[in-house]
């Protein structure tokens, strides 16, 4: 049984704290890991991969020292290990061009503009993780308590098994 | 934490694997009196399958596949053990008059076995005069041409190996085709949202009072699960129940009823028709092998009163245990019937198939033949396409086929008979016998798959019936029905059935809630089954 991780990449510690606090209710089922730069994120992804776990959701800032968030996401999209990871861009400063690039090349799933409301980021995370487990996982029951129950039940109905 | 979990899983797998192999090998090292050579092999397969099914060492459907594999390799006419085998011959030596000398190994319980061809023999009773290495016997039916089986423990004694196709054939058993027909209808219903839309229509008359909505949910769930898989029905009904639960405050016990009523109704509803749930298939297939055919309509008339009764008991129990505080609330029923041509073809075929199933007494076409109508009809018209057919639960068919195949070997090797003959059953009153069978089935099935429980128990009942060992008044049909019903009434724990697991995962209920209601349904259910078995079922069958 491998775990499905949520990875947050953000250079400002205060913002990172807020994101983690907002997502706390998911942590029992989806362990959260953080990175402060794209390089740290690469290390983290490698570690998660080596432990035999998966990454269900990546929430990523754009403007960071070193490589930008969009570049990291494009990289993740090309890597088969993180190809199916749901990708959320959390930023106040990405320009139109970079955003278009993120959508086209990184298959960006969501864009959250700063500042955001706590409820908003939870909703996005729940929605994206629900999509991830329906597409990628066989055993859905264990996620019922924290994710979108209606969509999970619907998926079980159409698959016809638990 | 994940590492610890991993270790537990490994330990469980290891225990299952070693016990299973031990079970398989045990009969090779021990000689059991009164059990044929083939019976020993069948016992090994039976023990291994039982362990693997219980521990789920490998997926339960693959245990079924393994059973069939072992049967074709070990127990079939063309398999490793029997392909070259002939009965060992011995010629009796003439003494005087009707007296003959035969090898001691050729005598068993005062009988010799006269060879008819390489694999067949006929027992002949003789008068044993003097035992020794060569035994002196007396019989008027032995001549110098007579050839006797030299060793009565030979593997062909007590067993005529069937061709391998008999074991493969279980996958095309009429009951499997009946289920396939049911799967096609259910799959197409999900594809065209017939199940959801029917639910919306059927729920409307139940108004806005909480307990009536629950009653409505239960009746609709039971009705759908009588034709569809219990699991898919539960998941679908949960999509109806979850929006209701969200309206209710977290402390309100109504959430418990809401989440409990659906899996319970789905489990109970499965009993109502032959295609409702796989244990029914095991019952029907085993009876069919004894030449007892139960028509679709007769099954329903046997089981429907029990279904209705259990639904009512469950509803009342929950009403008492968790009285709702809400006065009324609105049920938002959205959706409308698909009116495309393909959907209409589905509606027509569904209606026609069910109609033909229920009117077998009038037209005489067996239900599994009728089941081929939706199989052909839905594919010819492309209502069900390649990808839809691929997504049918084929593994359930393998599971049932393996169960039927195991039943065949338990019967024809004499294993089932040997297992039940160790107890003198005729000392038991019939009702007590039914109670024991029902209770064992209920207990086992709370922990094992319902289908597996039926697979392990029904062949025992069948051999008690065919051997006459159970004494006066034993009815094979009634005993099988009791076991089948008891398997479906097991809903004590989240692991008892997939619908229970679904309900548990919502977080609206805790295990004790499920256990409380489950115990009542199980115990009252067993009593109800026994009452029906004495008063109602005999009426229907005659």
Image: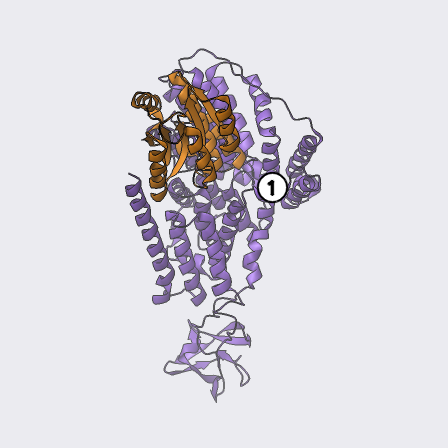
Chain colours: A orange, B purple
Position above or below: B510 against B75: above
Local crowd at mark 1 within 10 Å, few (<14), some, or many (≥20)?
few
Q: What's the residue at 44%, 21% (across, down)? A: A112
Q: Nearer the viewer, residue B435 or A67?
A: A67
Q: Residue furthest top?
A: B327
Q: What's the residue at 57%, 17% (across, down)? A: B205
Q: Nearer the viewer, residue B130 or B371?
A: B371
Question: Disc 1 designates what residue?
Answer: B387
| Place of residue B281 in the rendered image (x, y in percent of width and height, measured from the top left) | 53, 45
- Does A3 sit left or right of B161 as displayed? left
Q: Nearer the viewer, residue A109 or B1?
A: A109
Which structural element holds mark 1? Answer: helix
Q: What's the residue at 67%, 34% (across, down)? A: B346
Chain of the residue that carries numbered disc 1 in the rendered image: B
In the rendered view of the protein, which quadrant contains the N terminus of chain B? top left
Q: Residue furthest front?
A: A66
Q: Which of B80 and A126 is in front in this view?
A: A126
Q: Is residue B188 visible?
A: yes
Q: Is residue B218 visible?
A: no
| Place of residue A57 in the rendered image (x, y in percent of width and height, measured from the top left) | 41, 31
In the rendered view of the protein, which quadrant contains the C terminus of chain B? top right
- Does A80 sit left or right of B2 as displayed? right
- Residue B185: image quadrant is top right
| Place of residue B219 in the rendered image (x, y in percent of width and height, measured from the top left) | 52, 26
- Residue B194: image quadrant is top right
- Does B426 sit left or right of B352 as displayed? left
Position above or below: B20 against B534: below
Numbered-mark total: 1
| Place of residue A106 in the rendered image (x, y in percent of width and height, measured from the top left) | 48, 32
């Amino acid at each position: 049984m491998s775990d499905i991780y949520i990875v947050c990449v953000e250079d400002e510690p205060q913002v990172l704290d807020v994101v983690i606090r907002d997502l706390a209710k998911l942590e029992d089922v989806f362990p959260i890991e953080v990175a402060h730069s794209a390089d740290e994120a690469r290390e983290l992804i490698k570690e998660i991969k080596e432990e035999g776990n998966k990454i269900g959701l990546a929430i990523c800032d754009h403007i960071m020292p070193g490589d930008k968030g969009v570049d990291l996401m494009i990289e993740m999209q090309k890597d088969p290990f993180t190809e199916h990871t749901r990708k959320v861009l959390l930023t106040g400063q990405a320009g139109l061009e970079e955003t278009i690039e993120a959508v086209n090349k990184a298959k960006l799933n969501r864009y959250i503009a700063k500042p955001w409301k706590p409820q908003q980021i939870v909703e996005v995370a729940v929605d994206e993780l629900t999509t991830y487990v329906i597409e990628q996982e066989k055993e859905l029951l264990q996620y019922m308590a924290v994710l979108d129950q209606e969509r999970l039940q619907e998926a079980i109905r159409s698959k016809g098994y638990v | 934490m994940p590492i610890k979990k991993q270790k537990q899983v490994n330990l469980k797998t290891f225990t299952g694997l070693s016990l299973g192999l031990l079970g398989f090998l045990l009969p090779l090292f021990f000689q059991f009196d009164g059990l044929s050579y083939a019976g020993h092999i069948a016992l090994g397969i039976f023990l291994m399958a039982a362990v693997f099914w219980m521990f789920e060492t490998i997926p339960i459907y693959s245990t079924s596949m393994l059973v069939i594999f072992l049967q074709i390799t070990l127990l079939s006419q063309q398999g490793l053990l029997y392909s070259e085998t002939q009965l060992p011959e011995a010629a009796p030596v003439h003494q005087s008059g009707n007296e003959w000398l035969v090898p001691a190994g050729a005598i068993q319980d005062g009988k010799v076995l006269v060879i008819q061809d390489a694999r067949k023999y006929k027992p002949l009773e003789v008068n044993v005069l003097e035992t020794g290495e060569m035994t002196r016997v007396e019989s008027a039916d032995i001549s110098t041409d007579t050839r006797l089986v030299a060793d009565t423990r030979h593997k062909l004694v007590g067993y005529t190996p069937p061709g391998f196709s008999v074991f493969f054939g279980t996958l095309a058993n009429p009951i499997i085709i009946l289920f396939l027909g049911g799967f096609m209808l259910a799959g197409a219903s999900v594809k065209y949202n017939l199940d959801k839309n029917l639910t919306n229509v059927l729920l409307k008359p139940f108004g806005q009072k909480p307990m009536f909505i629950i009653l409505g949910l239960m009746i609709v769930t039971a009705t759908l699960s009588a034709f569809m898989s219990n699991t898919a029905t539960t998941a679908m009904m949960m999509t109806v129940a979850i929006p209701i639960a969200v309206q209710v405050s977290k402390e309100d016990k109504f959430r418990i009823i809401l989440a409990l009523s659906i899996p319970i109704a789905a489990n109970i509803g499965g009993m109502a028709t032959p295609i409702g749930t796989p244990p029914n298939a095991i019952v029907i297939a085993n009876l069919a092998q004894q030449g007892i055919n139960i028509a679709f309509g007769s099954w329903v008339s046997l089981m429907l009163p029990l279904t209705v009764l259990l639904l009512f008991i469950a509803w009342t129990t929950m009403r008492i245990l968790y009285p709702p505080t809400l006065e009324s609330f609105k049920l938002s029923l959205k959706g409308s019937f698909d009116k495309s041509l393909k959907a209409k073809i589905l509606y027509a075929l569904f209606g026609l198939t069910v109609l033909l199933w229920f009117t077998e007494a009038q037209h005489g076409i067996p239900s599994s033949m009728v089941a081929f109508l939706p199989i052909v009809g839905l594919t010819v018209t492309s209502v069900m396409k390649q990808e839809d057919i691929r997504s049918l639960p084929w593994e359930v068919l393998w599971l049932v086929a393996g169960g039927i195949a195991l039943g065949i070997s338990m019967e024809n090797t004499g294993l089932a008979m040997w297992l039940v003959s160790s107890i003198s059953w005729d000392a038991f009153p019939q009702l007590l016998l039914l109670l024991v069978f029902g209770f064992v089935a209920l207990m086992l099935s709370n922990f094992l798959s319902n289908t597996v429980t039926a697979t392990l128990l029904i062949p025992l009942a069948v051999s008690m019936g065919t051997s006459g060992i159970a004494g006066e008044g034993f009815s094979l049909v009634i005993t099988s029905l009791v076991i089948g019903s008891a398997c479906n009434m097991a809903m004590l724990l989240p692991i008892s059935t997939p619908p229970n697991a679904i309900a548990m995962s919502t977080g609206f209920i805790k295990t004790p809630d499920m256990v409380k209601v489950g115990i009542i349904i199980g115990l009252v259910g067993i009593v109800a089954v026994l009452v029906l078995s004495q008063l109602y079922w005999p009426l229907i069958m005659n």
